[in-house]
Image: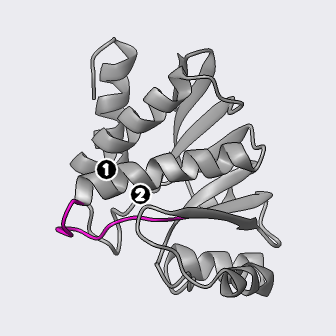
Amino acid sequence: MAEQSVGGKVLKLVKGDITDMEVEAFVFYARPDLKLGTGFGGAIAQRGGPSIQEELNRAGSLGVGGALVTGAGNLKAKRIIHAVGPRHHEPEEEAKLRQAVRSALRAAEEAGLKQVAFPAMGVGFYGVSLDLCSTVMLKEIRDYLKKETPLKEVVLCVLDNRELVPFEKRFKALSEGDRP
């Protein structure tokens, strides 16, 4: 849908189902107990098979702002980065969301990945506002890509037009040189 170069790397904005993407890895907005649950978690469990939850069970739990990498079972992606972010109106919501995005990027880098896809983090069940989400994610990802990193491509994969509009607006502003 939209693409721009940041520090010699590619940042893309697409609309679709992140669990059906052919990417090295995608980020899942995980629960602290690392149970896949419903929604995208249910889709991951159903399409990916039991090996993903088994790997998460061995990890135990993860604090807000943390991230870890697992295999992706039968999904098209090779890996899943499980990042725990805040819930809406949680104290320090913005700072915790920033930390979750940075942790997911670092986890991708530490796993030797060159490509990672992110959803609109926390905007569904966890109630993070699309305005906050799009602003924080684009700033953190762009700042990360400007540095030395083996990551070559980051894809922002939004689910629907409701999510697309604020991301598109900020994406366009950034490509014209403005801050998010």
Q: Where, by quadrant of the figure, is residue 8 drawn?
A: top right
Residue type beneath disc 2? Met
Q: Position of residue 82 (x, y in %)?
A: 58, 66
Give me the C-alpha separation between circle 1 and circle 2. Answer: 6 Å
Along the viewing direction, whichever of 151 and 180 lies nearer the viewer: 151
Residue at horizontal 46 percent and vertical 56 percent from the top: 159
Residue at horizontal 32 percent and vertical 72 percent from the top: 126
Along the viewing direction, whichever of 46 and 28 lies nearer the viewer: 28
Q: Where, by quadrant of the figure, is residue 165 drawn?
A: top left
Q: Position of residue 161 (x, y in %)?
A: 36, 50
Q: Where, by quadrant of the figure, is residue 136 drawn?
A: top left
Q: Which residues are drawn in magenta?
A: 83-92
Q: Is residue 4 above or below residue 127?
A: above
Q: Is residue 67 above or below residue 45?
A: above
Display colour scheme: one colour
Q: Position of residue 30 (x, y in %)?
A: 50, 72
- Res. 56 visible in picture: yes
Indicate yes or no whether the magenta region holds residue 85.
yes
Residue under label 2: 121
Q: Position of residue 174 (x, y in %)?
A: 35, 21
Q: Main secondary structure of the magenta part?
A: loop
Residue type beneath disc 1? Cys
Q: 10 Å neighbourhood of mark 2: few (<14), some, or many (≥20)?
A: many
Residue under label 1: 133
Q: Quadrant of the C terminus?
A: top left
Residue at horizontal 47 percent and vertical 36 percent from the top: 141
Are dots 1 and 2 in contact, CB under 8 Å?
Answer: yes
- Res. 120 visible in picture: no
Left or right: where 116 falls relative to 35: right
